[in-house]
Image: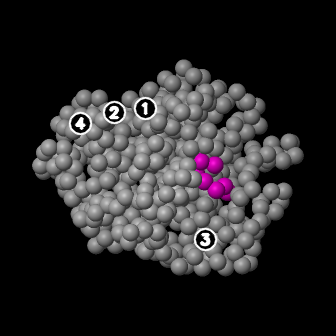
Amino acid sequence: MLTLTRSESSATGQIDRRFHLHSQTNLHRHQQQGPLVIARGDGIYVIDEQGQEYIEGMSGLWCASLGFSNQRLVEAAHHQFNVLPYYHTFNHRVSEVTARLAERVAVLSDMPEAKVFFACSGSEANDSMVKMAWAYHRARGNPQKRKVIAHQKGFHGSTVMGATLSGLPNMHAAFGLPLDGVIRIECPHHYRNGLPEESEVEFRDRLIADLQRRIESEGAENIAAFISEPIMGAGGVIVPPTGYFAAVQALLKRHDILMLSDEIICGFGRTGRWFGHQNMGFTPDMKACAKSLSAGYQPISCAVVSGSVYEVLELQSQQLNGFGHGFTYSGHPVAAAVALEALDIYQEMGLPAHNLGMGKVLHEALSPLLEHPLIGEVRGIGLLAGLELVADKNTRAFFPASLAIGAQVELAARKQGLIVRNMGDSIALAPPFIITPEQIQAMVERLTAALNDVYQSIGQRP
């Protein structure tokens, strides 16, 4: 077992606490405890400034899909820095490498006549989809179609619109969010939200009936789009019931509501298909991608737009003399070069079939944890897994929030040399695609030891 070292006294820790305002962090607690300073990476491992090594079971933030030391990606960036370190995509301009990446993504997209808009983050890509949905309906004579349907516990980014779309209250209170215009619907998690004795099929049908009623009450003429992650990552790695999204899409089509797929986590092979919507049996009108697009080595995202939506936007831009949206770093050539190399590596690896096989290894290794007294459910697809922490396996009762059980498991895992993600009562795993079966077994052994440590610490023994 590792002994965690506190970093507040290190030079880097002191600098960080003095000058750095962290993302998604308890700022007061950070001033007290300081950061975990990661100094370098090697394959699926990261090493802190004290030399302690951790299996990075979350690929950083779901994104370092090729690990932390892939030299081909480094060399791709270095080459592009020498050739053309920056150019933009405004006013009919583009770098050669950006155009080639657009072609690659469009071909992989499984969307008819797709066009690709580039940005730098998943939040920007989701914001862009909403703006394009508004533009689409406005161009077709329906400017009142503005509302967006989104799930409780969904996560769509930290920008104003991304946080508004997200169904996570901790992202709202400090900022006076969400803005008006989001229709919040129930999270499609049968384990937590199913009624007593309600089957998964009955749960699915109830949610679809509820969605129909919400559309009728809000007025379909006022609704622009529906957005969801195929598998809801930050909400707890929630896998919806079979057939849920196909039924949703059929309902949306009847009401002229666009379907937007947030593929930030699921996209580019993590689920054992190129995109999560392929697992779930629907084809979106637009989808947002990021994270594994460049394996996290460069900030890049995209919104993939179907041909039917693009045709409307093109005609509108002709009428308005321009498409009034974009970013300084959209299609940045260095990021594009790294993403192209990542896609080359994925195809050489045999993705997505490789991740489908490794996902089976992962879920087989995790399945014995269903017998652990702290675990109520193990769920996921491919190299994406979530474990539900429960105080009582029979009643599925939550632990008291004051116990911070997820944070306890996360810290205990770090003591075992494993980094996981806690989302309150859920623990997430999303390891790099390059993980081996032996490393998966080591990861699960460390997680099991952490669960045992926490179970013992709260006064019980497995």
Any part of residue 60 in sight: no
- Label 1 vs 3, first from the N-terminus: 1
**Alpha carbons under labels 4 and 2: distance apart:** 11 Å
Residue 29, compared with residue 144, is above or below; it is below
In this view, the residue in front, 373 or 24, is: 24
Q: Which mark is residue 338?
A: 3
In this view, the residue in front, 291 or 206, is: 291
Q: Nearer the viewer, mark 4 or mark 1?
A: 4
The residue tagged 2 is 193
Q: Mark 4 is on which residue type?
A: Arg
Q: Mark 1 is on which residue type?
A: Glu
Q: Which mark is residue 331?
A: none
Span shown in magenta: 118-124
- Label 4 vs 1, first from the N-terminus: 1
Crowding near the residue tagged with mark 2, few <14, some 14–19, many ≥20 C-alpha atoms within 10 Å:
few
Assign the N terminus to one quadrant of the image. bottom left
**Alpha carbons under labels 2 and 1: distance apart:** 8 Å
Q: Is residue 170 left or right of residue 360?
A: right
The residue tagged 1 is 186
- Label 2 vs 1, first from the N-terminus: 1
The residue tagged 4 is 396
Q: Nearer the viewer, mark 4 or mark 2?
A: 4
> Pointer 2 and pointer 1: residues touching (CB < 8 Å)?
yes
Crowding near the residue tagged with mark 4, few <14, some 14–19, many ≥20 C-alpha atoms within 10 Å:
some
Tag 3 secondary structure: helix
Q: Mark 2 is on which residue type?
A: Asn
Q: Mark 3 is on which residue type?
A: Val
In this view, the residue in front, 28 or 164, is: 28
Tag 2 secondary structure: helix
Name which quarter of the figure residue 376 lies in. Answer: top left
